[in-house]
Image (spheres, rainbow, N blue to C red):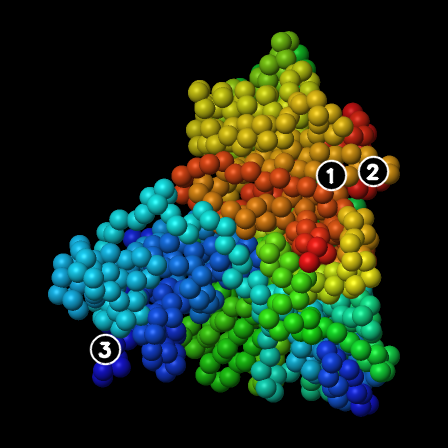
Amino acid sequence: MKELNKLDRRSFLKTSALAGGGLMLSFSWIAESKAAKTMQNVAADWNELTGYIKITSDNIIKILCPNPEFGQNVMTSLPMMVAEELGVDWDKVVVEMGPHDNVKLGPQFTGGSNSIRMYWKPLREAGATARQMLRQAAAETWSVPIDEITTKSGVIKHSSGKSATYGEMANKAATLTMPKGLQLKAPKDFDIVSTSQKNVEGKKIVTGKPLFGIDYQVDGMLIAMIQHPPAFGMKLQSFDAAQALKMPGIKDVFSFKLYDTDFVQGGFDTRSFNEMIAVVGNSTWEVMNARKRIKAKWEPTGDMIEVMSGRGGNTEVTVPGRLESTENQMAMMAEKAKAPAKEQRKDGDPETAFKNAATVIERTYNAPFLAHNTMEPMNFFAHVQEDKALVVGPVQAPGWMEPTLGKILNLPADKIEIQMTRMGGGFGRRAYGQYVFEAARISQKMKAPIKLIYSREDDMTYGIYRPMYTATYRAALDANKNLIGFHVKGGGIPESPIHANRFPAGAVDNYLAESWEIPSNVTIGAFRAPRSNFNAAAEQSFLDEVAEAMGKDPIEMRLELLKRAKENPVGKNNDYDADRYAGVLELVREKSGWGKAENQKYNRGVAAYFCHNSYAAHVVDMIDRDGSPYVERVTSAMDCGIVINPDAAANMVEGAVVDGIGNAFYGSMTFKEGQADHNNFNSYRLIRHNEAPKQINVHFVKSEADPTGLGEPPFPPVFGAVANALYKTTGKRFYNQPFDSSDQPTNI
Amino acid sequence: MSKYNIKINGTTKVVDVDPTTPMLWVLRDHLNMPGTKYGCGIAMCGACTVHLNGMAMRSCQLPVSAVGSQEITTIEGLSEDAAHPVQKAWLEHDVAQCGYCQSGQIMSAVALLKNNPNPNDEDIEAAMSGNICRCGTYLRIKEAIKTAAKN
């Protein structure tokens, strides 16, 4: 009884104070929280002050990171926000990845550049709440008014000279009612936030500790791999596993279905194939070798009907069964681009503006599918038993995996435990759980703990790709070279890239955005802002060309449009803050020495973009290096509000710049008869050391605005800046990605 | 299956595996040394880099049967506590993002510095271009190598 009371009082009612952040549910979750149950057994001395903070009597202060880490450094930056308000020294804090518990630890979703933004308020509130409870405990212990209690560096003090560590007061504090409505610190008072702190897992990374899902192992664990159909649009007809089964170390070879026929798919249940062959054995090499001995026959799927859940109820979607090749995908897109499309936004009278224009500039941009190519291939551990399941591995959104696991395993949510490991990259790929569900299915069949590993070839040919996109942009200029009309019509396989309310919407009197799409069986999904990274490439190189036709400097031309959007915006729902957009352009102009004589040796390209709540601008400095265009230096300006961890934030931007240059030049996945043309790094080219710039200078706009993310925003405009620098270097405009290919059109 | 005595990080380990098994999987699956990473299996990414007699080698292309009496060093063998100058430099520059490729990067960098204690940019690029970092930490890697060279 005492134990129950302790749990109750210590931790679980306390979370209700966090409801203000919009993340915590206020119902009693003693019965709901799996972590609560484990706590009962293993963590007797941990006093839990809010779901995020645990303090032992001997003053070990632990902060739980709610969100999975895939290199964006949330394991450092999120706990920094807690520590700031808790009032402890950062170097005294122990950081640990939290358990999966959406009730206790919020959404726990890594993606959409949202971690910092969505946890900014709740994590500071958690720190402030815990600090207040510690002060209250001291006030009660010492019988003094709480107002007379101060804290500094994890020590509680009273003016009489009494003092105690947080640890000494933690046990009592955990029994107190959670205070509400606490005042949070002003940015000028920050001690930890906005200081550069090193990656809390840095030491483990450089010493090769087992941090990643692929490193996870338990006694008796088997290794599993999957043989998937060789092409999108194909399915398993039959297979002969006799030879594979004879191979040493092999336990079983069997086919399995991922979803039952009546399965209703949620948005992140995307899966490339539903029936596959699993090979299970003692070790990876043995399983890899045995897999080669499977004799499988495949047949066309034909059109498939899938039931998708959505806001308006379930809808049936027909997935075409054709075997797609890049050539006919391009042809289909070119054809569809000519047909009438869906109007997304219209301001003024674009038809008349184009009719009356003195000059019309029209350009079409194309981009291929992209594979994520996380360095750690997809993998997951699963141990499914009759009445419960444990799954462990790299996953961006455990909260989205749990309901699907529940459905396919027929287990209630409280019998499914998901543990999150560090991810060897994500870029959106690990928001989709097909590999988690596959691992669960295989473990269920084997009645054993298994670790599913994708080979690099599996990972690349069996992807959730960045879609293939195209867009045609048109600009109307009057006789005085004023921009009087703007039109974008874009589409893709299988989705459109158009964000109709983004710049330059709002800055041009006559504006039209239209979109279309072509269904496909090639599976697609998030990829570091998939639509934005295409749009920023196309639109920002188009604006460069329009500026040139207007006889204007490309930065000046954008700033003039933004001034218009700010002072006298056209239309409604403009999805950007013109001031902040202009702010990054002004900063990058200043810091890059734009127009300065000393930079004349560079062929310079500029681009800016706003997506996922942050603003980014880059100036790319290109040279001709031994006959090839090479980006030697990049200047970046970002506005993400308050910068939590400046050096780590700069690292993120540097990485996005390198990734952007790499994908702009080389990124491309093509298909032949449904089969991916590239299956490893010998033919899918990624940027390497010698191709990265020598310098990337990152600057942040000084701001006290609430912080926003950096995972996506710096990435998209890199493509446009590279395209514009290529024009300066080669005299040719680049309309088709990847830029480093021989088939660039010559429509200039 | 065959038995092999392999010298790894100064101690001799015994494994009983198929002779074609790459050292990568011997380390990861059989010796519980998962610091050496699987990235591509065809020596195109460098994630599995180890040292064979001090030379950088992709362990995915090194069958256990070819090792013989040669010495293998893995990331775990550099130091337990990040005391190696290259590991220290990595921490000083806070190089890692996801961190998956970094043990391979560090092993390539250590081998480079052993042969060329004071590499210039081109030397670094030549030695390191076999190691892919998908997060794009190349600039910090280069700076860390220069820092390690100074120390």
The circle drawn on residue A632 is 1
Characterize the local packing of mark 3: few (<14), some (14-19) or many (20 or more) Cα atoms within 10 angstroms: few
Left or right? Give the position of B107 relative to A716: right
Q: Residue at x 58, y 52 (%)?
A: A526
Tell me the crowding category of disc 2: few under 14, some 14 to 19, or many 20 or more residues within 10 angstroms, Cα based: few
Q: Residue at x 71, y 69 (%)?
A: B38
| Residue A680: quadrant of the picture | bottom right
* Percent of width and height locating residue A744: 81, 36
Answer above or below: position of A387 versus A58.
below
Q: Which mark is residue A369?
A: none
What amino acid does circle 1 point to?
Glu
Label 3: chain letter: A
Q: Nearer the viewer's eye, disc 2 or disc 3?
A: 2
Q: Is residue A691 left or right of residue A709?
A: right
> For mark 3, what is the residue?
A5
Q: Quadrant of the C terminus of chain B?
A: bottom right
